[in-house]
Image (cartoon, helix red, strand yellow):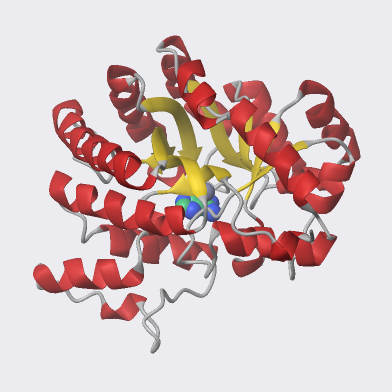
Amino acid sequence: MSYVSRANPAKLELHHHLEGAAPPAFIRGLAKEKHMDISGIFDAQGAYKYVDFWDFLKVYEAATSTLQSPEDYARLTRAVLEESAKSGVIYCETFLSPDFCGGRDVGAWREYLLAMREAAEAAERDMGITLRGIVTAIRHFGPDKARQTAVCAAETVGDFIVGFGLAGDETSGAPADFKWSFDCAREAGLHLTAHAGEWGGPESVRAVLADLGVSRVGHGVRAIEDLALVDQLAEQGVVLEVCPGSNVALGVYPSLRKHPIGELYRRGVKVTISTDDPPFFHTTMQAEYAGLHAAFDWDDGVFAEITQTALDAAFCDADTKTKLR
Ligand code: ADE
Ligand code: ZN
């Protein structure tokens, strides 16, 4: 049986931003309810419109400005998980930012979290999809806000909040600026990941490994520019959260065929597959699988191996992993 003929295999997704997964129609609906005019972030077809990564970050933040209450985030969680479940996703780790959920106030953050968690539990009952959260600092918001974010993370670590991460503009500041936050999160028992090697080169990947002690790297694909680093990643079993469709949509690589995931995999790096911000990049987990099959001739065997890598690298507890097997 060829891969393309196989119906929607079960998938695990480790790199996904909750606001970035908001369907544009959902955001338009919220804007209308709140009498907000954000029409400038959509194109004539109603899709999100941006010209480059930095513009994408602005559009992302404008879309997110419509999300103003725990109830809004509960509705978002439901809408997003419905889309993911259609793609066969049975487990998703999503990035959540106290910057957008209560302005990094721990009390407000707890209320947002409760709302998202209840929506996630309902989705698990109804659709069989499990959600876990990675609290994420935003690099271009700076180290002071990241410290407050880490405190929010440390205060809410548990069976839902399982990780701490760093997203946003990789060209802003240095990983070492965020060391206090990552140390705080690690001491609280959280697993760690950071975006690197998307807009920065191999030195950026080396820095998050050395300065922040992450076990996974968000993207990480530009490690391919330094084969000694590729060997190090393979030897140390560092897991890359690769988002091929995102990288092509944002112009990191011109096409999937030119994307380094095939070579990273061949060289023994533990790669996983994710969508990042699916509607922004006109992708889904199903589309990622189909694209990788077409570009690299990956078959069920490769996808099964990558699914196992994702399960091993997931930040959830052992009981949850057992249920997912
Ligand atoms: N936030 C949402 N998507 C992102 C990406 N691809 N890189 C960095 N920060 C992000
Ligand atoms: Zn991302």
| Residue 253, horizontal then vertical, whole percent | 73, 64
Query: Visible in this render: residue 139?
Result: yes
Q: Residue furthest bottom?
A: 44
In the rendered image, the quadrant that contains the C terminus is top right
| Residue 27, horizontal then vertical, whole percent | 26, 67
Determine whether, in the image, residue 222 is placed left or right of residue 192: right
Q: Residue furthest top?
A: 187
In the rendered image, the quadrant that contains the N terminus is bottom right
**Front-most of residues 301 and 311:** 301
Residue at x 88%, y 44% (from the top left corner): 266
Determine whether, in the image, residue 260 is placed left or right of residue 169: right
Determine whether, in the image, residue 59 is placed left or right of residue 102: right
Residue at x 45%, y 66% (from the top left corner): 279
Query: Visible in this render: residue 138?
Result: no
The image quarter in which residue 23 lies:
bottom left
The image quarter in which residue 128 lies:
top left
**Front-most of residues 125 and 182:** 125
Determine whether, in the image, residue 9 is placed left or right of residue 61: right
